[in-house]
Amino acid sequence: MSNSFGRLFRVTTWGESHGPAIGAVIDGCPPGIALSETDIQPWLDRRRPGGNRHVSQRRESDEVRILSGTFEGRTTGAPIALQIDNEDARPKDYAPNADRFRPGHADFGTQAKYGLRDWRGGGRASARETAARVAAGAVARLIVPQVRINAWLVELGGDRIETFDTDEIGRNALNCPDPRAAERWAAMLDAARKNASSLGAVVECVAEGAPAGWGAPLAAKLDADLAGALMSIPAVKGVEIGDGFAAARSRGEDNVDEIRRGPAFLSNHAGGILGGISTGQPIILRAAFKPTSSLPRPLRTIDGEGADAEIVTTGRHDPCVAIRGAAVVEAMVALTLADHFLLHRAQCGA
Amino acid sequence: MSNSFGRLFRVTTWGESHGPAIGAVIDGCPPGIALSETDIQPWLDRRRPGGNRHVSQRRESDEVRILSGTFEGRTTGAPIALQIDNEDARPKDYAPNADRFRPGHADFGTQAKYGLRDWRGGGRASARETAARVAAGAVARLIVPQVRINAWLVELGGDRIETFDTDEIGRNALNCPDPRAAERWAAMLDAARKNASSLGAVVECVAEGAPAGWGAPLAAKLDADLAGALMSIPAVKGVEIGDGFAAARSRGEDNVDEIRRGPAFLSNHAGGILGGISTGQPIILRAAFKPTSSLPRPLRTIDGEGADAEIVTTGRHDPCVAIRGAAVVEAMVALTLADHFLLHRAQCGA
Amino acid sequence: MSNSFGRLFRVTTWGESHGPAIGAVIDGCPPGIALSETDIQPWLDRRRPGGNRHVSQRRESDEVRILSGTFEGRTTGAPIALQIDNEDARPKDYAPNADRFRPGHADFGTQAKYGLRDWRGGGRASARETAARVAAGAVARLIVPQVRINAWLVELGGDRIETFDTDEIGRNALNCPDPRAAERWAAMLDAARKNASSLGAVVECVAEGAPAGWGAPLAAKLDADLAGALMSIPAVKGVEIGDGFAAARSRGEDNVDEIRRGPAFLSNHAGGILGGISTGQPIILRAAFKPTSSLPRPLRTIDGEGADAEIVTTGRHDPCVAIRGAAVVEAMVALTLADHFLLHRAQCGA
Amino acid sequence: MSNSFGRLFRVTTWGESHGPAIGAVIDGCPPGIALSETDIQPWLDRRRPGGNRHVSQRRESDEVRILSGTFEGRTTGAPIALQIDNEDARPKDYAPNADRFRPGHADFGTQAKYGLRDWRGGGRASARETAARVAAGAVARLIVPQVRINAWLVELGGDRIETFDTDEIGRNALNCPDPRAAERWAAMLDAARKNASSLGAVVECVAEGAPAGWGAPLAAKLDADLAGALMSIPAVKGVEIGDGFAAARSRGEDNVDEIRRGPAFLSNHAGGILGGISTGQPIILRAAFKPTSSLPRPLRTIDGEGADAEIVTTGRHDPCVAIRGAAVVEAMVALTLADHFLLHRAQCGA
């Protein structure tokens, strides 16, 4: 069950970075929903590598095919198999380092766990796996069409945005809502690449339109599921809901979201979720992405025999994985909300 | 499944704040483990209200009984039913506000979801439910005895610790590793209580002794499960692993944990987990607790008919829920690690 | 997860035959349903031992208490904890055989699996556990009130009923719809008891009122779930749906259920389920109960050291467990149908 | 979760009879196991249609490809994606009946459930889906190599075998262990085909080599899981374990399996499972297959508007689906045992 996400809208992904293909099987999709490849492709295109100089130069068309679960353009309720071929796999890029553990990556733990590992680009642990999540997330959006889910970067390399313009996000290559910050960040990324370095960033995601009442106690708290969903994205090391860590520095009377008739909340410090259940306000999340550990500079590590070694990661990598990560954040939020919509409908009938 | 936590070491909790009792059923516990009430009681005592002036004055002995799953002092592999009676329930404290939604609480969402709610102290959404988690967590510790799990406060009301002394944590009433901070915090809490206010805090938890190799991809990433586990604790709004949000401000070469033979990691920015799998280093987590919204001052809200109303929360509440929350953080980490130990053993046989 | 049944209407039972109590926790129950102990007690009374000379003489009042999950007489959507005290436990009856495996029972496999076992009356494997299922099944009936579920014996010790009168079932102590067969069976049971023997039987169950459309492919086929549910009842060794094994001896043109407008099926060889999905016809099931292996006569076995031994089962046992088993069959069918109602509502919205 | 089977060795199948392909994703496979297509293909070949005149004349090479989860010929612990192309799909065969429900099939319930259906050869409900199960079952066998799983027919059209010769099973086209019965059955099948009829049959399966101790209480009883697994196979209407329905006609002293040192059971009426846990004896199962309802003769039904109609099933069908069903029975038993091996290892460590 390790590779399946969700309880009722259940997505199982498979595939390695340098195998023949990757894919996702969606089980539990409601029937009768209009679905074709054109509903999925735009989201994949947004995540796709090779789009500009700030992301990996691997060239993948990321063309998705639907192999099952639809009939005459509608979902049938049967499992939906989505498949994306790997076209520009270059496993040989990784051969020189086959026997060394890339520090900052899953390599060491994977070897410890399984006793062997597919060293070609991280194999299963590669961020390439997230393409399958984005494809599944596109289907999830159709299950909860009343919800609008958008993610963007609010901070890159410690530099925060100062203005916010939704329209700006799509205009630049960095998913940045502040045009001046986008310019600064582009320069920072160029410098990082030149210095064989990489940068972290914070992605913010807002989901508007979810009604009050999604979620449930303990293991199905909406915020707990969202936190797990975001933390499962490669490179994410922190998650916040609403005011997040700032809430820990506030006073009760400042943090509480009072209510007036409507119902109208007078603030949204909670980020749209209280007691694990949605309040009907916008759901606000943030995920901290670490700088990628795939660096084209020598790093100290050990080899398969445990001896000291040095490693220079070649391959083609993003200097800041959060840029493409925004699309993955949206997908994970969509998957979580679709699942909770079905969970709520099961128990409460609406 | 909403009220069950874990996949193989599976804990289902039940009970309301002001009902006759609360409890937990543990399914999947390995057999042959020495277990009696004395293994559980100390952990409950630590979380127990009424211990000092900084926590709720509700008086509960929180005596746990084991009703099944053991024989002659050892676990049998059958479900373990744990039960704690509610002794000092005072539902009438809540009667005046039965028809009004406490802002900052699950009340509004619960009503929207279920169409009715147990208004006595938050019912199921009460932090009292966490006593059942602490009891189950005590059993989880016995499944992974090689792991030492400790939590403490590193920040309260925005004031951070400056020194760290493990022995100090048990000496003060605030789970604080810095004696001077403990003094400052005590004064801050007294002031908050006097001002009908409340304070947030950050709890840090370190689990030492987990081997490399626990965890797995996507939905069973160890960090994803831990993040979900911590975010499921009432009042938690943010979770970090390792450097957390600070990682988003660092450079790749500074964030990466290089390795030397041993294996010896030269740093632990990752917090002991990479690619969802443990590395064998200490697992480091932080959870941000918001200040409680149960305030003995008038707050604006609406009533069941949607009309504007005012509410003053009486009842007996902690001015900073994170103090007792540290025990709950430890319990959730223990439950997650026990579950992953079994998951790992299932797939990899060790 | 071994001790939990169902996906969305999820029941976890706990407790041993001679421990302090047994119980069930129901997670996922829809909110707003009128529920009190009086909705559950009659079903427990029907299953209760001590009712007449044909069943175990253990005296249990089997009084159920609801410890959580209701408020002002209605379900809240929170977990429902049901508890039944064990009153007439006599573990000493079993002490003489503590070290010997009762043949025909779970003893040998339990010891092999867990390395230890609660030998008091079979511990967890005792049929007493089924009282918790019957209690939970009573709640399940309220989730699908449109469905009428009834079970009776159609065969005992190889002797089949020849007439069928629904009203007769409650009149005799044997859940037998044929008064003459009931007389014959009573004599057979008296003889079996006198001869230190026991008898098997076949229970039939019909569920009327389930609409077309419950069920789903592969692992959630309605018939697959029902078969697993019935086979999980102690002593059941065979399950049939519709014509069952007789279908294997029939021709396609005789077995197929043709349809006329209405829709009106011209027959029901399928037993109300085709391709794992209900057709709207009555769901018809049969379960074969073996004769109990608890016999008051010497049987050959081995002891804990593996040496040859002899065992005489004392304790108080039913000469035909299927008589009380009918109530358990009904409960398992109710649990399965309630779960599928919720599964269907989740995916298809009605 | 409807299309996933198993808890820890979890198989999700996808695909329709007349779509581009079918497949299975295995999640939870232990690492380090030698696996290539040649380990799977022979089992698919055995189930394959077109092999002789007694089975469907659809021509499928059923060539399986492994798309993920292996590296250098060994499993990595990552999901294993198996894929089989549909080559000889002829959806037009079904077009004339697109608007009519085939009696005896899932058509009516599928339409009632989902509001639409893929009418091409039954879509998802087609027995073609079982090829994906057989492929996954081949991998499952490698997880429990100590277990030998074999299935054969013991009865066809009501005619039982009289002799049993293991070697004979592979010699005839009917999976029949009695050469004379095989001759009679061949004649019966020829007659059935000529008469536009079909025949049912009983498949028996024996799994030898499973140790004592697999299984667990309630929802993870080994016999309950096996019963559900077999009942999930298209056309199965009854399942027996050990003596099955004959046990209901026996006396306790005749049915009990006494034990002598060794341990050596003196009989195996239980079919290798007691109290839901394996005893170490051979596990013996039987499944009753109904005659297929796909008959090339006019049957009464209704159309999509509910009006009376007539239907003649064309397409290419097996006169007795149990013949190829034997391979599916073996696969489902293998999947169940592999899952229970992992479940047991998780809880009990061996």
Image (cartoon, coloured by chain):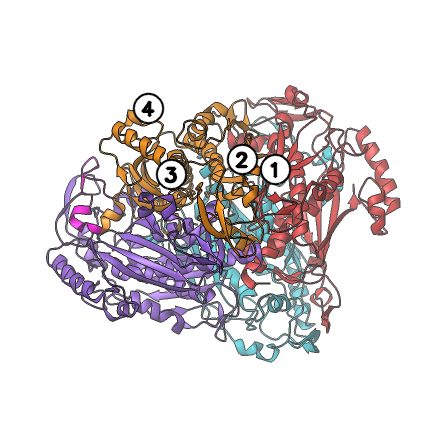
Chain colours: A purple, B orange, C red, D cyan
Marks 4/3 in contact by CB < 8 Å: the verdict is no
Rounded to the nearest angstrom, the CA distance separating label 4 from label 2 is: 30 Å
Q: Amino acid at mark 3?
A: Asn
What residue did someone put label 4 on? B171
Q: Nearer the viewer, mark 1 or mark 4?
A: 4
Residue at 23%, 60% in the rendered image: A161
Whether discs 3 and 2 lie on one chain: the answer is: yes
- The span from disc 1 to disc 3 (Cα, nearest Å) is 38 Å
Q: Residue furthest bottom?
A: D96
Residue D78 visible to an observer of this rendering: yes
Left/right placement of residue B49 relative to residue D218 reads: left
**Vertical comparison of D300 with A344: above or below:** below
Image quadrant containing the C terminus of chain A: bottom right
Per the image, the residue denoted by label 3 is B195
Disc 3: host chain:
B
In screen coordinates, is B24 left or right of C191? left
